[in-house]
Amino acid sequence: MRIHMDEEVTLVARKSCFGLPTACPSCLPVYIYLKFAQFRFSLAFNLTYPDSDKIPYVESGTYVAYNNEKGGVIESLKEDGIVDLDSEVHSVPEWISTKAMVNSWLADALMYELWVGSDGSSAHKVYYSDLPWPIGKYLYFKQVRITKQLLGITKENADRREEEIYRRATVAYGALSTRLGDQSFLFESRPTSLDAVFLGHALFVLHALPDTSVLRSKLVEHSNLVQYADKLKMEFIDGGSSSSTPPFPADPSSSFQRRGGSKPKNKPKKEKTEEERKFRRRAKYFLVTQLVAVLVFLSLLGGSDDAEVELDDDDSLNYDD
C-alpha cells in the first residue's frame, strides 16, 4: 500500500523534551529516518497512552504503520515501498551485523539505564509526567519489572548482568567509532536506517540521561561519535523545517477518525470543540481504568511478599516535582 502524495503524513510519537523533537528512544529514530529521507510529515504527540507498544506510528489516509508490527515503523515503510534508505547496503554483511549490534547490545544498555540503572527521572519525564503521580509511579514500577524480565535480571545475577550489559555497550561504541572514523555517516556517503537508529540512541544518551550516567560516560569517550551526533542533529533536526507539530495529542485507536481532508488548523471552531470533547472523554476513561489498576495492584502488593513482585529498595523513585 502506498501513501498518496495529496494526503498528509503524520508521525505519532511521545512528547518533546530534553531539547529533542521527541524524547522517546523508540520514536526518535523514526523521526530521524524521515528527516534523512527528506520526507514531509507532521508530528503529533500522544500523551494518553504512555505504555502503548503501538507508538510510534505513521499514518496517512487509510495507511498506518505501527511500532509493534513488521519489525517496527522503519521496516514497515521500507517493506511497503514508501521510503527505503537501505537499498544499496541491505545485503552488505558488515552493515547487517553492525545494525544487529546496535539493535541488541546498545538497545539493551539504554533500556537498562532508563528503567533499572538510574533513579528513573528521565523515564518519568518522558513517559509519565503528564499523568497523576500514583498512576505514573505504578506504570513505572510495572515497566521496571518488565525490563528486568526482558534482560534476564534477578536478585542473584543483577551485578553480573549489569557488568555484561555495560561491557557489550563498550565494545559496540568502540566498533562504531572505528567504523565511522572521520566520515559523515556509518556506511557509504549517505545515511541509512543504521544511522537513524544509532543517532537516535546517541542523542537520547547525550541529552536525556543524567551526567552521572555510566552509558553516557562510555559514549563521550569517543569524540568522533559525539561530533557525529552533534553535526547531524544540527543539520537534520535543528535546521530542518519539513515537519510541524499539531497542538493536540493523538490517539492510537483513531487512525481513521481524524481524517477530514483538511489540516487541524483549518477546521471550523465547532469541529475543534467536538474533537476536544472526544479527547476529554477518552482521557477520563483512561484515568479511571488506570486508577482501578493501581488499586488492584496495591491490594495485591499488600497481600504478597516483596520477593514476588521484585520491587527492591533500588527501584524506589526520588522525583523532584
Image: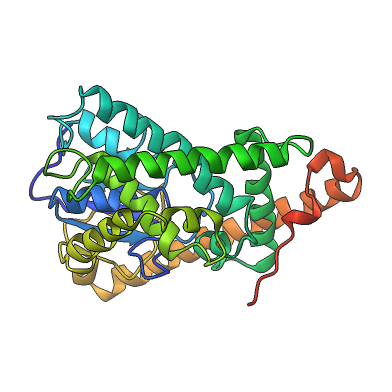
Residue 317 pos. (x, y %): 70, 63
- Image height check: is 264 above or below 193? below
The residue nearer to you, when weighing 210 against 288, is 210
Quadrant of res 44: bottom left
Q: Is residue 107 visible?
A: no
**Residue 135 sits above or below residue 81 on the image:** below
Horizontally, is 312 left or right of 89 in the view? right
Horizontally, residue 91 falls left or right of residue 88, namely: right
Q: Is residue 12 above or below residue 267?
A: above
Q: Depth check: 313 or 252 in front?
A: 313
Identify which residue is drawn at 48% across, 42% down. Answer: 169
Q: Nearer the viewer, residue 121 or 61?
A: 121
For the C terminus, the image quarter is: bottom right
Residue 33 appears left or right of 50: left
x, y percentage for residue 200?
34, 52
Q: Residue at x 33, y 32 (%)?
A: 98
Q: What residue is drawn where x is 14% and y is 35%?
A: 2
**Residue at (29, 55) in percent of width and height:** 224
Residue 273 visible here: yes
Q: Position of residue 234 (x, y in %)?
A: 22, 66
Q: What residue occupies the far left of the structure in this picture?
A: 5
- The part of the image, by quadrant, that contains residue 271 is bottom left
Q: Is residue 120 left or right of residue 79?
A: right
The one of 129 and 192 positioned closer to us in this rendering: 192
Quarter of the image with the N terminus is top left
